[in-house]
Amino acid sequence: MSARLKAAFRPAAAMGLALAAVAIVLAALGASPLAVAADLADGACGNWIAVTDTLAKATPLVFCGLAVAIAFHGSLWNIGADGQPVAGALAAGALGPALAGWPHPLAIGAILGAGALGGALWGGIAGWLRARRNVNEVIGTIMLNFIAAQMLSWAVHGPLMEPSGAFPASAKIAAAARLRLYFAPSRLNLAMALAVALALVCELGLFRTAAGFQLRALGRNRRASAFFGVPIARITVGAMALSGALAGLGGAVQISAITHRLYETISPGWGYEAIAVALVARLSPLGVVPAAILFGALDNGSQVMQRADGISPELVYVVQALVIIVLLAFDAAAAGGWREFLGGGAPAAAMEADDA
């Protein structure tokens, strides 16, 4: 089997095994796995509104999944794709009300640009700490997640609180800064098209540019990259800033198209879900798009599953976790052989993407 075919087979097999495990649990609980699966599919794509809502839910996951994939290619474990969209949303929500009277294209560009800059700053801080102070980026990005959440809480209870002061939310952004919705009453907007375009740009940048090669070389072997003159510090800070900008765009898009204002809990956990999206996509930027749509479908369908079958929507998170566990097991087995894997042999890095 070719390397590319194997790369496509593993995520599908992981998803199949995860669903089989969940089906066994459902059967043990007395529920019909087929009925639950049918209701899940109906909620995700049973009609046109369901399809468009699935795409709307998948959109921030594409941005955050791209952020994670870019950083992971450089062995930069960006666990901050939950705080970076919050930083982007905070910047967009703060600027949005001031854009009244602006031409629509300029207002959209300004609010999305603010979101990207906010996320880039948040990711760049973690990159600078890693490059200049050798602070582990896992610790740095997790701590920055908490800081971003607390900053958002402070903002909507303080300087950005809506004029009446009755609710912990910001004032609505100007109408000119709102991405238009299509196929009402769905929430579909042009952000998904932007996300797909960025996925293509990231794919070309990673595999067709010198900077992308340097980032991937850094991810393979930091010492060898330094020996051959790769600017480690600059690539580290730049990759984390770019990763943050992509995640920040996801937050800005949510403000511009969906909520139109800041709330205390703007992110339902996109950053952590995006890690699963990036892993299922094998860290391929183009692969992030269908992986995000799959996870968006699971999220969207879980609501119908709960209403029709009485099954908690938290089951979706069980499926996501099982997919990651099985996928990592597949990678370890493929790298070291089933005998070494089962016997405790050292597996290769599970996050490494297939370049063949």
Image (tube, helix red, strand yellow):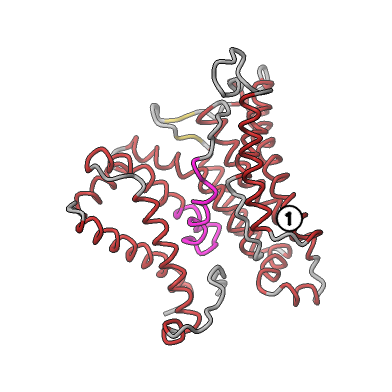
The quadrant of the image that shows the C terminus is bottom right
> Where is residue 138 drawn, in percent x and y?
64, 58
Above/below status of 261 relative to 238: above
The answer to whether residue 157 is left or right of residue 186 is right
Q: Residue at x 55, y 77 (%)?
A: 348
Above/below status of 132 relative to 312: below
> Where is residue 266 drawn, in percent x and y?
54, 35
Residue 354 in which image quadrant: bottom right
**Label 1 secondary element:** helix
Amino acid at circle 1: Gly
Between 72 and 8, the one lying in front of the other is 72
The answer to whether residue 343 is left or right of residue 213 is left
Residue range highlighted in magenta: 268-291
Residue farthest to the top, as pictured = 164
Residue 45 in which image quadrant: top left
Between 246 and 325, the one lying in front of the other is 325
Q: Residue at x 52, y 79 (%)?
A: 347
